[in-house]
Image (spheres, grey):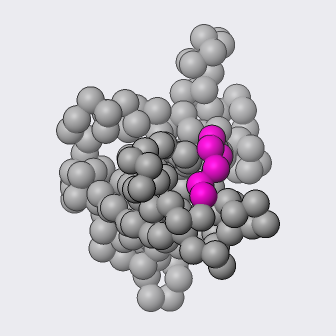
Amino acid sequence: MRKQKPVSDSFVIMTELVLPNDTNTLNNLMGGRMMHLMDIAAAIAAQKHSNRIVVTASVDNVSFRDSIRLGNVVTLQAQVTRAFSSSMEVHIDVWAEDIPNGTKLKTNEAFFTFVAVDQSGRPIDVPDAVPETEEEIRLFDGALRRRQLRLVLAGRMQPAEAQELKALFDLK
């Protein structure tokens, strides 16, 4: 039986200030810079869960809802949602805060997948993730469907094999 860890043990908060070199000509945070920050926060969460070196395997469902402006404080919250044999799904929420105006807005959300590797770069088993709160359970329950969708889209699983997706659409 694999070791188990609560998903809350992987929780990460990362905070950054948006400076001029991070922005485009409209003084908004560049999308690539946002993805960079998200990748770092998510990697730290995956490392905390696995206690291993991790590599990014996939990024999906990145949504850019609202612009993040020059001078905003960006807060990223990341946490493992579910672990498979060597891979882990990580959920990231991004908040932009305009401190002088006293406003805070959720601007981005994404799911990243990481694989734990040994010193030679070969995949290595990770502990099972144990959800405890209602939100953690909701994300945990949806992780298998998201994983199957990623695998189907990557051509690594046949749609007919994706039982969780078929159940979602009530397909026989």
Q: Quadrant of residue 153?
A: top right
Q: Residue at x 55, y 46 (%)?
A: 107
The image shows residue 56 at horizontal and vertical percentages of: 57, 67
Tell which of 41 and 51 is nearer to you: 41
Asked if residue 107 can be seen in this view, the reply is yes
Q: Is residue 96 left or right of residue 25?
A: left
Find out whether residue 67 is within the magenta segment.
Answer: yes
The image shows residue 156 at horizontal and vertical percentages of: 70, 50
Q: Residue at x 59, y 70 (%)?
A: 36
Tell which of 112 and 126 is nearer to you: 112
Q: Main secondary structure of the magenta part?
A: loop
Q: Residue at x 32, y 33 (%)?
A: 135
- Quadrant containing the N terminus in the rendered view: bottom left
Q: Which residue extends farthest front?
A: 100
Q: Is residue 25 left or right of residue 62?
A: right
The image shows residue 151 at horizontal and vertical percentages of: 66, 46
The image shows residue 65 at horizontal and vertical percentages of: 63, 41
Q: Which residue extends farthest bottom?
A: 119
Find out whether residue 131 is within the magenta segment.
Answer: no
Give the answer, above or below, for where 88 lies relative to 51: above
Q: Residue at x 33, y 61 (%)?
A: 13
Total of numbered circles in the picture? Answer: 0
Give the answer, above or below, for where 144 lies relative to 60: above
Q: Magenta span covers which residues?
A: 64-69
Asked if residue 30 can be seen in this view, the reply is no
Q: Is residue 2 left or right of residue 43?
A: left
